[in-house]
Amino acid sequence: MSDLQELTNKLLEFRNARDWEQFHDSKNLATAISIEAAELNELFLWKNLEQSEEVDRDKIKDEIADILAYTLLLAERHGFNVKEIVLEKIAKNNEKYPVEKAKGNSKKYTEL
Ligand SMILES: [Mg+2]
């Protein structure tokens, strides 16, 4: 079993023991991902670059874990293999952002 599948199974076990599947429709899971990402951003809000590197790592870990947990649950709901879809996305981005055009700049692919 892959690490990602093992994590997903742990999340499902936790959720199902609490009968929370009823709340985990796609809209709620997508909203939860967005809220957890906002909580991550809040850790850095109003800090300069130097202060941003000094944010409590435990708090960063918590928010990363929350984002990933809801992401895995949303992927599971749709039967997606997370490894496959990330690899597919990397392949798409390789086409959008060829190294010879994208290396060293942050322009969007439409402006390359
Ligand atoms: Mg959180």
Image: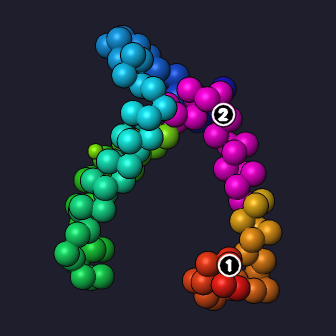
98 to 20, vertically: above or below: below
Disc 1/disc 2 C-alpha distance (Å): 28 Å
Q: Is residue 7 visible?
A: no
Residue type at tag 2: Phe
Marks 1, 2: nearer the viewer: 1
Examine the image and state in which quarter residue 48 appears.
Answer: bottom left
Give the class, few, some or many, for how many residues have Cα within 10 Å of label 1's Cα (few <14, many ≥20). few
Q: Quadrant of the N terminus?
A: top right
Residue type at tag 1: Thr
In the drawing, does residue 85 fall left or right of residue 21? right
Residue 25 position in % (x across, y down): 45, 26
Give the secondary structure at mark 2.
loop
Label disc, if present, on residue 80 of the rendered structure: 2
Residue closest to the eye, 6 or 16: 16
Q: Is residue 76 magenta?
A: yes
Residue 38 position in % (x across, y down): 31, 55
Q: Is residue 73 magenta?
A: yes
Which residue is located at x 76 percent, y 80 percent? 99
Residue beneath disc 1: 110
Residue closest to the eye, 111 or 104: 111
Q: Residue furthest left?
A: 46
In the drawing, does residue 27 fall left or right of residue 42? right
Which residue is located at x 76 percent, y 61 percent? 92
Q: Earlier in the sequence, mark 1 or mark 2?
A: 2
Q: Quadrant of the C terminus?
A: bottom right
Magenta-tinted stretch: 72-90
